[in-house]
Amino acid sequence: MSDLKAKLGLNVFKPLPSPHIRIRPGMERDPRLKAAVRACPAGLYAEGADGVITLTIDGCLECGTCRIACGTAVLEWGYPEGGGGIQYRFG
Amino acid sequence: MPESSAKGRQKSCLPDGAGSAKRRLERKNQFFIRLFMEKFDVIVVGAGLAGLAAAWTLAGEGVEVVVLERGDYPGAKNVSGGRLYLNPVRDLFPGLWDEAPLERAIVREGASLMARNRSVTFHYTGSELRSDTPQSFSVLRSKFDRWFSERVEERGGMILAKTLVTDLLHENGRVCGVVAGGDELRADVVVACDGVLSLIPERAGLRAPGRPHDYAVGIKEVIQLDRNRINDRFNVADGEGAAHLYAGDITKGLFGGGFLYTNAESVSLGLVVSIEDIAREAAAGDAPSLFEAFKARPEIEPLIRGGQTVEYGAHVIPEGGYRSLSRLAGDGILVAGDSAGFALNLGFTVRGMEYALASGYYAAKAVIEAKKAGRYDAATLAVYRQSLEESFVLHDFQTFKDTPQVLANPHLFGHYPELIGNLMRDLYTVPAGPKSPIFTTLRRHLTLGELWTMLMDAKGVTKI
């Protein structure tokens, strides 16, 4: 996991005023979110021992995998405001 | 007359640079007034290949066009595996390719079946790949798209970066503009090139949200490597490159595969896996771990040894083919590129960029027709679909409409790589004792049951 953090550290990110993706309130234990724990390329979703799934938005690659995998019933999903978030230099 | 002489005088008083700066400023002011207070001819959402292709074509015909891009610069949000096939699109963009920042012409193709502990590889090269007009190039999108956007600006197209489109404007049931950064921007027609998630067409009611079955996630590292090392390791010369695809155990039996493309001074190494499969199959582990395991394979590690990873990216890829395309036109709106679902995986070739370029081009042509007619309703814009049907774009999607189902056969990602790997192992092994006859070795692996499975799978293969 630390390898992944180091790799994300190679990317250029611009700060976001607020998270552009949120788990909808009350949905933190929804089984649909487990898909994102496995599929997120940045490993930003984690499941705690209590079954609660959390999302850390820092390092988001804005790929959209979680929106497709989990759906908008459990995720409030948007792109960051213009000029924010990841800025690919190679792409 | 006095007006023109005043202009002439003014021009002669100012040095050339200042004059052109002033003209640029005036043009910019006029642009902002038109865009924010009046109405634009065409708003393109997204400066990817589809959006830039549309804008390049429109601007070339003198149509007023602005591209709204959420990234800091065009290309800042764009990730591709990294291979562009030029043949289908070369003539649609005359004069564009000579100076284009393409990485390397692909002159060597490779494919590997990856079993758990072994792999079988073949290479292909041919004189046609080394011709004066190579069929494909590796590309890095942040570099290429930024350059392409400058060519659009040269032709008079406008690019507005750092601008996120959040919604569409409607009037009498038709799209008449967008909401971006809280501002309402009006246009005769909106061309949605907003990328694979297709949020704008979703807003327009042209499609439902994407289903996991129809998408894969691609994960990629750009690994910097000395130019000469690339030449030596991949058996190519300066300007020449290699492309290699991998399938099998690297996705733990899930739909997907790996790729490696050589760039001028880096390597793009990636892994693609079905979102539906990775979400469902806990045993396969998570996507980042699959990628790490792929990278550590003895077939891969020596190729990137000593390289420096400089970027870690990911992108969703449409995999549904013809059946999961979006509706392509509505009243006041067209859809192109990934946003329409224009990507096609044929196993040996995985294509998206040339469909994006071509669909952007044909969308622009449809807009030009509509402008002549003075109507932008869905019926008038339907010429877009017709021209795509006549072009390679929808021809290909129709030809290969059954391919996604055939390629989804899990045997291709587990059973066959193991079978062929084991067969090769036994053919190559020299045991301490006597070696079995080759036919016995073949029959040990290719049993009747096995041949029956192959026959059944081959029935599907006739559809591709």
Image: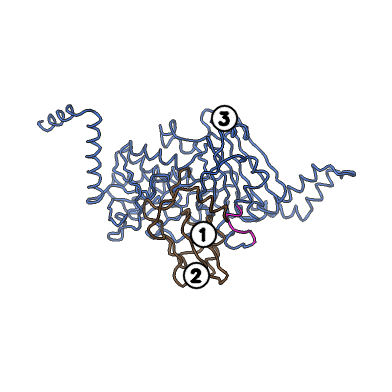
User: In blue, which chain?
Assistant: B
Q: Nearer the viewer, residue B392 or B99?
A: B99
| Residue B100 in view in this figure | yes
Question: CB of mark 1 within 8 Å of CB of mark 3?
Answer: no
Q: Do the dots labelled 1 and 2 sit on one chain?
A: yes
Q: Which residue is mark 2?
A: A28
Mark 2 or mark 1, which is nearer the start of the sequence?
Answer: 2
Q: Chain of mark 2?
A: A
* Circle 1: residue type: Leu
Drawing shade for chain A: brown
Q: Is residue B133 left or right of residue B434?
A: left
Neighbours of disc 1 within 10 Å: few (<14), some (14-19), many (20+): some
Does B289 lie within the magenta span? yes
Q: Which chain letter goes with mark 1?
A: A
Q: Nearer the viewer, mark 1 or mark 3?
A: 1
Q: Is residue A44 magenta?
A: no
Colour scheme in use: by chain
What span is colored magenta in the figure?
Answer: B283-290
Q: Are marks 1 and 3 on the same chain?
A: no
- Say the numbered circle drawn on residue B130: 3
Q: Where's residue B441, x and y in %? A: 82, 47
The residue where tag 1 is placed is A44
Q: CA distance from mark 1 to mark 3?
A: 44 Å
